[in-house]
Amino acid sequence: MQSIQAKLAEERLSPFVRVTLRVWIKGALALLAVARPVFDVVVRIELAQTMLRASFTMMMTHSTWAATEAIIGLIAPFLLMAGLATRVSATALALLICAGWRGATLDAGSLVLLALLGWYALRGAGAVSIDRAIARGLGDSALPLAAPVTRMLAWVSRQLAPLWLTAMRLWLAATLLAAGGWITPDTHVLPIGLFGLAVQALVLPLAVLIALGLAMPLTMLLVFLNLGTAMVMDGHVGLLLLPTMVLGLLAFEGAGTLSLDALSRRWLDRNVLFDRRFEDVPAHWPHVVVVGAGFGGVAAVNRLKRLPVRVTLIDRNNYHLFQPLLYQIATAALSPADVATPIRSLFAADGNVRVLLGTVEAIDPAAKVVTLACGTIAYDTLLLATGATHSYFGRDEWAAFAPGLKTIEDGTAIRARVLTAFERAEASDNPADAARLLTFVIVGAGPTGVELAGAIAELAHQGLRREYRNIDPSRARIVLVQSGPRVLPSFPEALSAQAAAALTRLGVEILLDSRVTGIDGCGVKLASGQTIATQTVLWGAGVVASPAARWLRCETDRSGRVVVDGQLRVAGFADVYAIGDTAASSGWNGKPVPGLAPAAKQAGEHFAKAVEQALLGRQAAPFAYKHQGSLATIGRKSAVADFGWIRLSGAPAWWLWGAVHVGFLAGFRNRVAVLVNWGWSYFTMRPGIRLITDSSHPGTKGT
């Protein structure tokens, strides 16, 4: 990290101030970005429920309530809750409050409701809403007036909604002052009864902070704590909900245009954040180049984006792939879009991160240059997180007949092979050919092999039932070949035995201590002399590191992984680091770090922390891998989990496996899509993505 430290001399701010300020601000903004849509949904739901209850009350107690008012009072809340026609429904409900109460004086609760509904009438619903989902397509549609109306609403959201926040802020400050006796109360426009603070000495300073619009999240938190204390003391906790929504709105959405927070944010954008364009980032900031957008690379950039550094993330694909669920693409349970996220979308809000699509051809550590097909990239610090690919142990000719599973292309190709095998068996008049086509051999009984075998067994026995006329898919033969004495050798023996039993119950044939000696278009040959006639062989027996060692011409271990020191620095290179399957690290209490996604993520985060420490002129501690456990699933209701201190199998482990994998998926859309597809497959017992879309392998071509 010497080059990073050398560049600090060009900073106007001290390294500590620059780094700490940026880390805290980026962290706070990230937290607000996550909480804002959640809060928006909660407020819409609560507003809808409140308005529905009020509407039912009005219908029951006022015989003169008009039919139009009743329709609005019953339909508009549901539209608001869903975020559909939000502005119209919020406006209608606000008018209903004003006119529907039959001239009665608006109480404090009604005033708060009007303030919140006014916000939604001007800004519309948040990110998790139907309006936001269709806004871009609606504005570009052929519907009459769609484009001008969309532009007008965008202008209202951009210009008028912040002014409404400003008005709400001043309204709240006046309410606190009136409740504290600092000004003459006006109960017609101020909801004084809902905002009495417990500590009266804080009324004036809090009101001043609110009026100035300074540090609104913190100020709103202080008001909430004070207000909550007062209501608990008075026994009116139920009245805290409406004020909380107002405080939360100002905390999460900001203080509005005319505020010190807005001025501060503009200064921060120009001097600290630089989150608009990569070109605006100061040229003297250290340049960190990350090659590979897998788990390790993305984890590193997720931390690096908060630091005063320029980051270039290079990958040969434009997406980040969640590899643990890749086998479900191969077995028709999920589509590629469910387990992959565009890399650019992950860092769209971070101006100091640039994403490049390209393949590395060479690295010159002396010149500190990475060569791509499209040009060269200079770096101050380089991180290699390029993963691994299939290893056929010197028999690369097997690759044409036994594809591995590392990429989306691999997943769709394997899905095509598996489904085509059933189609060709259905069309065959030869029983021997049909039996060969309905035999599936998986080589290697690690997590990938076990998960593939279980998923194919369920596809054959359940998912394709009653879809064929000449064959019975449930009679398919699934063979799992393992050179060692047990499946899942990295797991404890007891869990391996339970996994083997679960596979056997699914109809998987397990061949242990069986070394493969040959694979061709006719089948698989074993060292025992046995030949398994099949046309579908899948490889899950081993991996080899990426070509990083060849680029650097450096020391490697037997698997081709780059040897690194305790800081994950490539041996012999001062500013080149390697993590994940690319690196041979002994950071697991002196043992080799396993090639698992959590290990890659921990290494990526450690690298980013080391960069942060270098910016502060400090030395980072050596990398220490903390094993978080291992998981493997076998079918739709069984899995094994090893956390060391606790070991699970069967349904409990399966539920845990599902929760962990959904939680680690990148992107809200992917989580929802996976849950929907899993729910469909689980309860209907039918896979949803049974499409043959790849014909590049011999096994998928015509009869």
Image (cartoon, grey):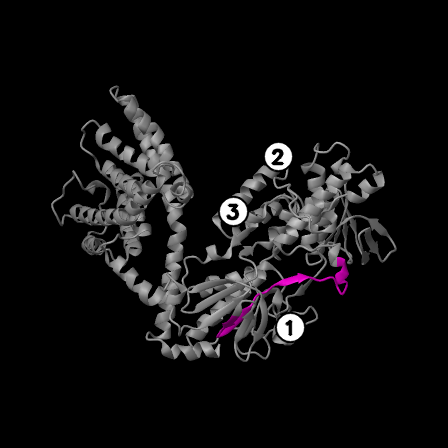
Task: Give the spatial CA distance, label 1 vs label 3.
Answer: 37 Å
Can residue 563 be seen here? The reply is no
Q: Nearer the viewer, residue 403 or 14?
A: 403
Foreground: disc 1 or disc 3: 1
Q: Is residue 492 magenta?
A: no
Amino acid residing under circle 2: Thr
The image shows residue 535 at horizontal and vertical percentages of 78, 48
Of the two numbered discs 2 and 1 on the same chain, state the one appearing first in sequence: 1
Q: Residues within 10 Å of mark 2 (few under 14, many from 20)?
A: few
Task: Give the spatial CA distance, label 3 vs label 2.
Answer: 20 Å
The image shows residue 126 at horizontal and vertical percentages of 37, 45
Residue sitting at x 33%, y 74%: 13
Mark 3 residue element: helix
Q: Quadrant of residue 45?
A: top left
Q: Is residue 379 left or right of residue 425?
A: left
Mark 2 residue element: helix
Can residue 281 be seen here? The reply is yes
In the image, residue 428 sits, relative to residue 379, either above or below, namely above
Quickly name the residue at label 1: 550
Quickly name the residue at label 3: 671
The image shows residue 180 at horizontal and vertical percentages of 17, 48
Q: Which residues are magenta?
A: 376-398
Foreground: disc 2 or disc 1: 1
Residue sitting at x 23%, y 45%: 195
Q: Is residue 493 left or right of residue 53?
A: right
Of the two numbered discs 3 and 2 on the same chain, state the one appearing first in sequence: 3
Amino acid residing under circle 3: Arg
Quickly name the residue at label 2: 684
Q: Nearer the viewer, residue 363 or 265?
A: 363
Q: How many marks?
A: 3
Of the two numbered discs 1 and 3 on the same chain, state the one appearing first in sequence: 1
Q: Residues within 10 Å of mark 3 (few under 14, many from 20)?
A: some
